[in-house]
């Protein structure tokens, strides 16, 4: 079975960003290419027989153990952090201070990365934030990089929650100003973790950002690997359901119309399901991994303006 490798590396592409809350029409999939129900049923039964009803869940994870570089190699200050998940699994992270230092930062961003690689492969999503006054906590789920254990749905959600709790206990930052930013699979993990926070923990969150994220495990598995995949993937902790339970803080959905990994319709579904106050930033051609870099980093500028506006309130 193929791995759902969604997000290794960065690409460049031209981007046009539409204004907030614009929801363009998306054409329905061509019915001619859909498998017949009978055939899909047989394939689904075969898939369940081979890998089990939830056996496809493990294919959402493509961890790399080797970390090819550190922030220092790119001239960035950082702190190596080791912390534990609820079950005792040892996890690894990089804590990157704002240029003014941890204490004087505008806010601290907890970044939940996508399904492939490790912290090094996702540094480019956040390496501009520190210069602009934000601390960044970039962590690895179990099985990724220096984090111990083996990736699983429940385990990675617990790891995301542990990341928020670790940051919330730091004495050298303002823990009342946390922002969740996530990409791709990280959107699902962060939303699930936030849903499991205590009321006091939720009060620490000032904003939530999900970019290039999927709305349903089953739907993304089906779009990537066909109808049979939906029979072996669990839709527990479904992002479109969990986003409705997020605390009512400003929430931003970012998605590219030409995302070739997570179809644009997933971003629409997440935005529609979310509570107000909410915004939807749309990239015309930023793709999946290059969404912040495309068109001379236009979307990066849009996100920075949103963050700065959030912290001024």
Image (tube, rainbow, N blue to C red):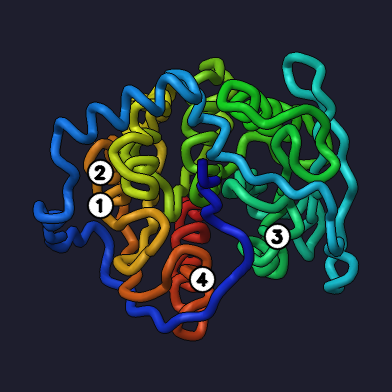
SS for tag 4?
loop
Q: Which residue is mark 2?
A: 269
In terms of sequence position, does the residue under pointer 2 or pointer 4 come before the other?
2
Q: CA distance from mark 3 to mark 4?
A: 13 Å
Q: CA distance from mark 3 to mark 1?
A: 26 Å
Mark count: 4
SS for tag 1?
helix
- Front in this rendered view, residue 185 or 75: 185
Q: Position of residue 182 (x, y in %)?
A: 53, 48
Q: Position of residue 196 (x, y in %)?
A: 52, 19
In terms of sequence position, does the residue under pointer 3 or pointer 4 come before the other?
3
In this rendering, position of residue 88 left or right of residue 10: right
Vertical placement of residue 189 versus 13, above or below: above
Vertical placement of residue 113 versus 291, above or below: above
Label 1 crowd (10 A; few <14 / some 14-19 / many >=20):
many
Q: CA distance from mark 4 to mark 1?
A: 18 Å
Vertical placement of residue 67 versus 50, above or below: below
SS for tag 3?
helix
In terms of sequence position, does the residue under pointer 2 or pointer 3 come before the other?
3
Q: CA distance from mark 2 to mark 1?
A: 6 Å
Label 2 crowd (10 A; few <14 / some 14-19 / many >=20):
some
Q: CA distance from mark 2 to mark 3?
A: 27 Å
Dots 2 and 1: beta carbons under 8 Å? Answer: yes
Q: Nearer the viewer, mark 2 or mark 3?
A: 3
Occupied quadrant, residue 132 = bottom right
Q: Which residue is mark 4?
A: 290
Label 4 crowd (10 A; few <14 / some 14-19 / many >=20):
many
Q: Position of residue 223 (x, y in %)?
A: 32, 48
Q: Which residue is mark 1?
A: 265
Label 3 crowd (10 A; few <14 / some 14-19 / many >=20):
some
Q: Which residue is mark 3?
A: 121
Who's the residue at 62% across and 27% down the image? 152
């Amino acid at each position: 079975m193929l791995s759902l490798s969604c997000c290794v590396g960065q690409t460049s592409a031209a981007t046009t960003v539409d204004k907030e809350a614009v929801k363009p029409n998306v054409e329905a999939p061509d019915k001619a290419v859909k498998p017949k129900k009978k055939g899909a049923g047989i394939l689904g039964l075969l898939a369940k027989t081979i890998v089990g009803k939830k056996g496809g869940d493990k294919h959402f994870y493509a961890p790399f153990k080797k970390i090819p570089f550190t922030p220092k190699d790119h001239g960035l200050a950082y702190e190596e952090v080791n912390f534990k998940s609820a079950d005792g699994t040892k996890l690894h992270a990089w804590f990157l201070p704002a240029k003014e230092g941890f204490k004087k930062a505008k806010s601290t961003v907890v970044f939940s990365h996508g399904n492939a690689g490790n912290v090094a492969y996702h540094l480019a999503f956040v390496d501009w934030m520190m210069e602009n006054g934000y601390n960044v906590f970039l962590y690895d789920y179990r099985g990724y990089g220096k984090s111990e254990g083996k990736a699983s749905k429940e385990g990675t959600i617990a790891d995301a929650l542990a990341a928020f709790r670790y940051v919330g206990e730091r004495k050298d930052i303002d823990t009342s100003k946390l922002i969740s930013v996530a990409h791709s699979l990280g959107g699902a993990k962060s939303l699930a973790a936030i849903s499991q926070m205590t009321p006091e923990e939720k009060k620490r969150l000032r904003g939530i950002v999900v970019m290039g994220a999927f709305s349903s495990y089953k739907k993304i598995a089906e779009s990537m690997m066909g109808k049979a995949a939906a029979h072996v993937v669990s839709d527990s902790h479904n992002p479109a359901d969990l986003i409705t339970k997020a605390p009512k803080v400003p929430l931003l959905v970012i998605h590219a119309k030409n995302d070739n990994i997570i179809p644009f319709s997933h971003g629409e579904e997440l935005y529609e399901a979310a509570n107000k106050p909410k915004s939807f930033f749309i990239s015309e051609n930023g793709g999946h991994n290059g969404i912040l870099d495309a068109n001379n980093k236009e979307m990066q500028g849009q996100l920075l303006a949103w963050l700065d506006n959030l912290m001024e309130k």
